Image (cartoon, rainbow, N blue to C red):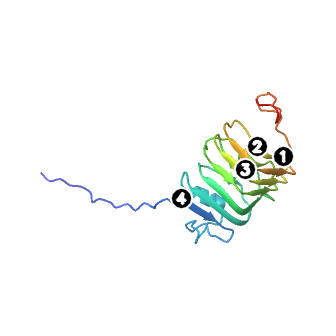
Amino acid sequence: LVSCQAPSEQRILATPIASLYVSPTGNDAGQCTQSAPCKTITRAIAVSSIGGTVTVLAGTYRENVRVTKSITLQGQGAIIDGTGLPVQNGGGLINIPASVSGATVTGFEVMNGVYYGISVFGSNNKILNNKIHHIQKVGIWIRDAKFNLFEGNELYFSVLTNSVSFNGSYYVCNPNNST
């Protein structure tokens, strides 16, 4: 009896990089490393690993950012400017969809949005220490999301429209009310 087997293939799997970098002078064909950063936040998120960190270096980024996995998106002097951008699904310049849980967005200046500065539809996320301003509708929009943490954010020159939910119930923000 003769046994025939195909030669074994050696597969080289790229090791996921836990920390990725974005710079306005980067290149999306690069590895998103500190020495060869990506140019867009969108590209870095696409190649990031769950639980990883995307550090967005100082500069102005004109893109709609969709956080599609549980990562830490960390701005270091980064500005997301919505001037002239079309409104994307979710409406926020930074959007966390319902399918994402456990993401953190911290340290960004978000400005000049048409609908929302940051929109959160997922649960168990953290929105920390962002400056959100000059948004035509709402600075931070939350819908159908639970157990999110919003802390240290600065919002100004935005319209407050968080008094009515989509199911017709009314909510009043009252710091003296524990419910």
Relative vertical location of residue 175 with respect to residue 89 in this rendering, above or below: above
Expressed as whole percent of the image width and height from the top left, the position of residue 140 reads 77, 46
Q: Are marks 2 and 1 in contact (CB under 8 Å)?
A: yes
Of the residues shown, which amino acid type is indicated by label 4?
Ala
Q: Say which residue label 3 marks.
A: 88
Q: Say which residue label 2 marks.
A: 141
For discs 2 and 3, the disc positioned in front in the rendered view: 2
Of the residues shown, which amino acid type is indicated by label 3?
Gln
Q: Are marks 2 and 3 in contact (CB under 8 Å)?
A: no
Q: Rate crowding at label 1 as few (under 14), some (14 to 19) or many (20 or more) other CA atoms within 10 Å.
A: some
Q: Rate crowding at label 2 as few (under 14), some (14 to 19) or many (20 or more) other CA atoms within 10 Å.
A: many
For discs 2 and 4, the disc positioned in front in the rendered view: 4
Q: Earlier in the sequence, mark 1 or mark 4?
A: 4
For discs 3 and 1, the disc positioned in front in the rendered view: 1
Q: Residue shown at 62%/69% (left/top)?
A: 27
Q: Earlier in the sequence, mark 3 or mark 1?
A: 3
Q: Say which residue label 4 marks.
A: 18
Q: CA distance from mark 2 to mark 4?
A: 29 Å
Expressed as whole percent of the image width and height from the top left, the position of residue 163 reads 83, 35
Of the residues shown, which amino acid type is indicated by label 2?
Trp
Expressed as whole percent of the image width and height from the top left, the position of residue 65 reads 69, 54
Q: Say which residue label 1 marks.
A: 137
Q: CA distance from mark 2 to mark 1?
A: 9 Å
